[in-house]
Structures are given as C-alpha cells and as structure tokens.
Amino acid sequence: MKYQHKLNQLITFTGLFVITMGWSSCKVEPILDPNNPGTNIITQNATLGEIQNLAVGCESGMRIYLGTYLDNVSMIGREYYRYAASDPRVTGDLLGKGSATLDNNTFYTTNPFDGRYRVVKNTNVLIEALQNTKADGLPDAQRKAGIAYAKTIQAHELLMVLNSQWENGIRVDVSNPDKLGPFLSKDESLNAIQNLLNEANNDLKGSSVDLPFNTTLYDKKASEFSKFNRALAARVAVYRKDWTTASNALNESFLDLNGSLTDGSYYLFSTGGGDLLNPVFNPRNTPPAEVRVTQPNWITEAIPGDTRLSKAPKRDATATQDGLNSDYDFFVYKTNVAPIPIIRNEELILLYAEVKTQQNSLPDAIIAINRIRTAAGLTPYSGAVTHDALITEILYQRRYSLFGEGHRWIDMRRYNLLSTLPIDRPGDDVWVQFPRPATEVTQ
C-alpha cells in the first residue's frame, strides 16, 4: 500500500487522544475534562464515530516522541549525530562522552518510553470500546477485526519500547492500571509480542470484512491489514532468531522481491492545523547549532557509486560541535512532511535474505541481496558464498538501505557487533540499552 494514497485520510485529532495522557506504564491516569467524555463513557457504548476517533488517536500518538526515539537509536548506532547547542546531553550522554552515562530520569529515556505506553493505553481503550459498543449493530467479524488492528498497533509500540530497554525487559500486560503485569525478560517480552501479533492475525487473515474505521497505516480491508501484521511478525521473529516463523510470516506479508522498495506502512505528517511535522527533517546546510549530520564512516565505508549516498549530501561547510565533525547532512527526508517508514518492502527483502541465509538457502539469499544491490546501482554480489560472508553483506545493505530508520543499533546488538561501531572521540561509549525509567524502578 503506497503511503501517498493514505495521506488524505489523515485526520487532525485534538480531543480524545489526550484522554490517556499518563506519564509511564505504571500509572496512566485519564485527564478529567468536564467538557469531554471520560474513558468510562467511551468504553461502555461508543458510537462508530467515537471509535473512529479512538483509532485516529492511536495513530496520531504513534508519532509522539518518534523524533527522540530515532535520534536515540541513530546516535548510539553511529548513523547520524544530532547537534543541539542548547542541550549538551545529546552529544554527551547518548555518546558516552567522558564519564557521562545514560540518565534514567531525563527526556531521552522517559519520553519515548511514556509515549509508547500512552499509545498502548489508547489501544486498550479502543479494544474495550469495541467489545462493548452496540453501535449500528456492528457485525462480530468487524468488531474482531477492529480489536485485531488495536492489538497489532499495541505489539508494534511494545517492540519500540523493548528496542530501547532490551535486557531490562518490559511490561506487556498493562490493561489494568491498578494491577500491572510484571516486567518480563527480554526473551519473554519478544515472545509475548509475537503472541500478540499472532492472536491479532487470527482475526485478520482471510477475513472478507473491512475494519470498522479508516486507517492511514495500511489497507482498511482486514485481509490486507493482515499483511502489515505479518510484516511486523517477521521482524519480531528475526529478533527472536526463529527463522521458520519469520519465513512463514514473510510469505504472508506484503513482501514482493520484484515490487517497489518503498511500498509499506508509514507515519504521515502534514502542515494542517494541530498536526505534526516530520520530527527529524532538517533543510540542507542547516547551521550546526541545531542540525543532524551523517557520521563520517557512513560515507567513507560506502561502495563508490552507491546511489543511497544521496541520503547524505555534502555540506557547504563542515559542521562541528562538541568535538564531532561531519561534512555531510542527514537528508533522508527531503521535506518537513515527508513520511517516515514503519516497515516497508525494502526491509522485508533484507529480512528474507537474512532468513534464507540462516536457513542455509544461500542462493535464495543472494537473489534478494542482488535485488537491493541493483536498486542501489551496484553490481551483483560476487563475494564468498558462506553464511558469515552473507550475513556481513546483509548487515552492510541494511546499513545503507535503512539509514536513519532506527535499525543499525539494533542490528549490531543482535549480532554482538556493537564493539565494531565507530568511536569519534576517545573515551566515548556505545550503550547496549537505555536504563529502566526512574518511575518504573520504584514499582
């Protein structure tokens, strides 16, 4: 599903999204507003219009603190550097400058964590509303499809939290704010997220109904939305090193080896009143006081002629801040309303290559690798046809194809390669994970 066809469905949302503006997974309290309905009213007998608003609120909320999250993982993964003269923690704490460590009670840790759990809370409200509504005799199949949509979003948001927390694990069961589930281990968290996606897909796969509301994430038809669910399931299965499950999920996703690399699901932005702009866009040659610039090794370690280098055009002048230097802008997104991928076909092709390599189907892996190389203007793969050589090649292709999309740090961590990431200042650190937020430590 191309994102362009979904942009005009983006609805400005100003009310219901804030009903669940809690600040952590531990205590997500509703804001009581006498001029707007509370969650108890919405969840007891919501109209279809109110259910649509809840769905819009979920999708709107997915973009909150997305910029902080992408800056976090891209900085630690040494993809790009965000210079922020007004806040030295960005180039200090995130890169482990000197004695700096990651703080468990500051914006880069707490905001993405809270933002994702806020969406999880919203999806739980949506699920409860769908379970209880009697609006217009909503068919049971549509009700189930709507709940499956909510569970799919919930799984994605939980994975975003786990990407940062990793060995700390996360809470998955937060449906009852007065009786939260325990923190699970990393492996238990991944398993629970996979199970949530599978549970949702049971009510999406093969369904002939539409979702009971519009969505900007993918197709409204339940059987088509299932393909988005399976794409996410493939990503999770790869993180779990469950190659059989990953292969099956890819087969049921929107993977297309010969299709457009950009097809997929996106966060959308607009200049409409009350809406959000792309949070990681900077114009070319933005002054170094507040800019994102490409880590120099991304340029020097690229294969000459790789067309993906257009994502990092050369600046008119070197950008310098806090002992860091770059001659190249981070320019993946060309405008302030450019969409940001959630998951797209290019990632799925690379996941397919990785799965085939891990299953020792090396010729199939090379076919997928060459699809990516050819699209980037490179010659077909001519290296060693071995497991280790192909994994190295796949990680290289992921580095350039998915630049700045939030994958490099995670990829290097899951292959125990964080120590190979570049260090631009003596004494800097590459962190394995963020600390558990202070509000969670005391629970």
Image (tube, helix red, strand yellow):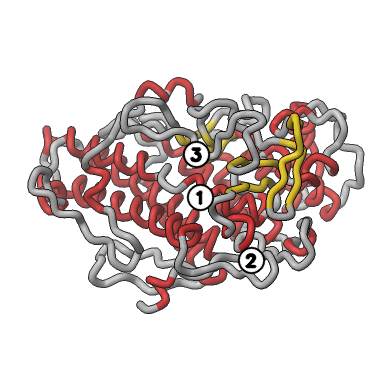
Say whether residue 194 is visible.
no
Q: Which mark is residue 279?
A: 3
Mark 2, Cα crowd under 10 Å, few <14 / some 14-19 / many 20+, is: some
Mark 1, Cα crowd under 10 Å, few <14 / some 14-19 / many 20+, is: some
Q: Which mark is residue 375?
A: none
> Which is more foreground, mark 2 or mark 3?
3
- Amino acid type for the residue under numbered disc 1: Thr
Residue holding disc 1 = 68
Residue at 69%, 49% in the rendered image: 321
Observer-nearest residue: 90 or 335? 90
- Amino acid type for the residue under numbered disc 2: Val
State the CA–CA distance, disc 2 to disc 3. 24 Å
Residue at 52%, 71% in the rendered image: 168
Residues under numbered marks 2 and 3 in contact, where contact means CB atoms less than 8 Å apart: no
Q: Horizontally, is 355 left or right of 239 in the view?
A: right
Q: Which mark is residue 432?
A: 2
The quarter of the displayed image where residue 432 is located: bottom right
Residue at 30%, 41% in the rendered image: 57
